[in-house]
Amino acid sequence: MAEKRQDRLAEYRGKRDAGRTPEPVPDERDLPHGDDDTFVIQEHHASSLHWDLRLERDGVLVSWALPKGVPWSPKTNHLAVHTEDHPLEYAAFEGEIPADEYGGGEVYIWDRGTYETRKWTDREVKAVFHGSRVTGLYALFRTRGKNWMIHRMDPPADPDAEPLPERVRPMLPQERARLPRDEEHYGFEFAWGGRRLLAYVEGGRTRFTDGRGREARSPAGLGGPLGESLGARRVVLDGELASVEGQETYLVFDLLHLDGHPLLDVPYEERRERLGDLGLAGPRWQTAPWYPGEGRAVRDTAKERGLRGVVAKRLDSPYEPGERSGAWRLLKL
């Protein structure tokens, strides 16, 4: 951060081939100068998902890579790895860096806006951010080498936000011999006969617990890609790992926590709608289908497909952790 002015972008240019990457690679020249008040945060799907924080300073974008993104609460600090300065033009960059180039992967603008400098030294930066997603006072402080930490100094922007729970014991259905008579009050799902897994996703990373609420190993090819697909969202998902057309797939059928807010007391129908809004669809995961009021049709289709059975869930039912509840009914076939 204390390099000579004319050399500020030498490291940046040295890592990039202007003929191969769509990134801006300016020639060596006098640096442009703005008002030192622009910031951008780019979501970078490189070999490991991270977020790049860039602050305009003396004609360049001083940059840090945040493996877990920006902390939403002052109770948690996140690692910030200081990287090379970037040109000011990079504040508008979105696109795909070729896989064999430095930083290969998709880059999206996650947030941008202006900031006010409260302090700027070689070891500490304090700034007030005015973005669409990130607002408030933050501090970046150096720990060792290129490693810094980023800390939120203001109270949480959402004072009602809660951290992800360490674990949730899954809700279980009661077995019944028949479908409910009042089908219009239920949503119906296939019972796939898979392994129950709850997924806890934060900062693009995923961990799992099993049907008893115990820590579970991440299935191959699932945890990392699932976390990356959700980006900065903070969620707890409930589902099962089952075979679908010969492919082991994580079928998600419930949403228990969303961006700092528990959904256990929210009716099943609304949880299902919010789950659908997440757009979960990947090579190893998808939102499990559900059919409000269509019990007989779901039962007949399950029989044709040779599935384990049908689960009927009351549309107005909350999520009852660890309970075998009559609000959920399993009809075995």
Image (cartoon, rainbow, N blue to C red):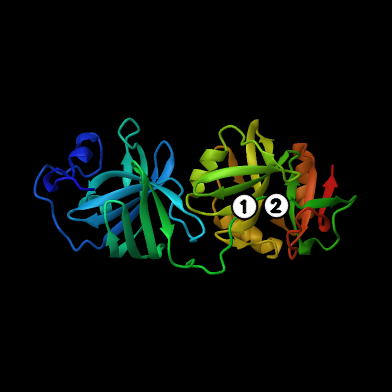
Q: Which x, y percent locates residue 79?
A: 43, 47
- Residue 308 falls in which quadrant of the image? top right
User: Measuring 28% from the left and 56% from the top, which residue is drawn there?
Assistant: 55
The local crowd at label 1, few if under 14, some if 14 to 19, many if 20 or more residues have their Cα within 10 Å, is many
Relative side of 102 to 329, left or right: left
Q: Amino acid at mark 2?
A: Val
Q: Which x, y percent locates residue 207?
A: 60, 43
Q: Give the residue furthest to the bottom.
A: 159
Question: In this orientation, which residue lies closer to the viewer: 120 or 315?
Answer: 120
User: Measuring 25% from the left and 41% from the top, which residue is drawn there?
Assistant: 22
Task: State the separation of the CA atoms marked 2 and 1.
Answer: 9 Å
Secondary structure beneath label 2: loop
Asked if residue 178 shows in the view, the reply is yes
Marks 2 and 1 in Cβ contact (< 8 Å)? yes
**Earlier sequence position, callout 2 versus callout 1:** 2
Name the mark on residue 168. Answer: 2
